[in-house]
Image (tube, rainbow, N blue to C red):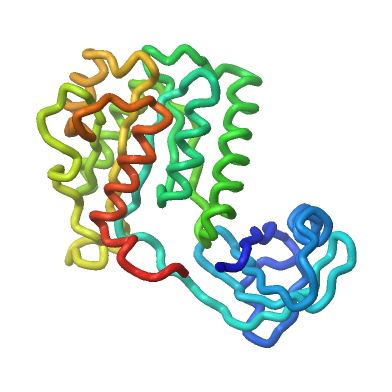
Amino acid sequence: MSAPVFLAEPSSAEPQGLAQYPAGSLYVLDGAEGRHAGVVQRRGVGEHVDVVDGDGLRLRCVIETVEAAQVGLRVDEVVEEPAPDVVVTLVQALAKGDRDEMAIEAATEVGADAVVPWQAERSIVVWRGDRAAKSRARWLATVRAATKQARRARLPRVDVAIDTRGLVERTREVVAACGAVIVLHEEASAPLAEVPLPVPASLADAAGGRAPEVLVVVGPEGGISEREVDALTEAGALTARLGPHVLRTSTAGPVAIALLVQRLGRWDGTPA
């Protein structure tokens, strides 16, 4: 069984973060994560745990001491996981009944690198004022929990909400940077498996060190409007279908992300 993952909290007192802990050193897991390990999960001496910084650095550790909310760890190994050479981003339309949060939770577990809340024309849920801040905070918490559940070392980015005008502009930017924008649509003729993907940064001569991005756009319960599809395709997006059946907004994104990361070869290796 893989070791449970705990996220290190950024600290101004330790600007180098986990990078300052080589193999053989001691690390103290405290705060909310320390309490979760020592009090909630009741982790004991001798157990293996991983501590990650959310940016690809992983400390493989063994518990040496447990004192309530402070867990003393011995670092056995330091692993630095490379950044993705194609960034896979789920643009999830806001949906009622927490279906949007269900979508980003599963998408994080299967490999999304970022999620974007989209205020689509047919979204029943509206993020405004205090509700916008509270809703985004829930998305951040959902992605964080899913990252730990999936034992990931990289924490997906959660962008601020955008409307359709903002999504059209983002589409132009992504396409101009040699990326791809894929709008999932039941009437599309091309299956997702055949949509061309960007050349990974590791293989592109002119990548300039920046990974290209794939945006996967998923509409709300009522679907993406014809006006939105037209605007996005005019900006360079492609439409694609997942299969013969129509999936819920909470299901379509994770399924699409899983198919894409498989095509990108991320599921061909062993767990980190």
Looking at the rendering, in which quadrant would you find the N terminus?
Answer: bottom right
Using residue 244 as the reference point, say whether residue 261 is left or right of it.
right
Q: Residue 159's spot in the image, x, y percent?
A: 48, 38
Give the side of residue 67 with respect to residue 50, left or right: right
Vertical placement of residue 39 versus 218, above or below: below
Residue 87 image offset from top left, x and y in percent: 34, 52
**Rendering quarter of residue 72:** bottom right
Outermost bottom residue = 24
Percent position (x, y) of residue 57? 54, 69
- State whether residue 127 is above or below residue 35: above
> Where on the picture, by quarter, is residue 103?
top left
Position in image of residue 235 (x %, y %):
19, 29
Q: Nearer the viewer, residue 45 or 15?
A: 45
For the view shown, which residue lies furthest in the right direction?
A: 67
Is residue 149 visible in the rendered structure shown here?
A: yes
- Residue at x 25%, y 67% (from the top left corner): 202
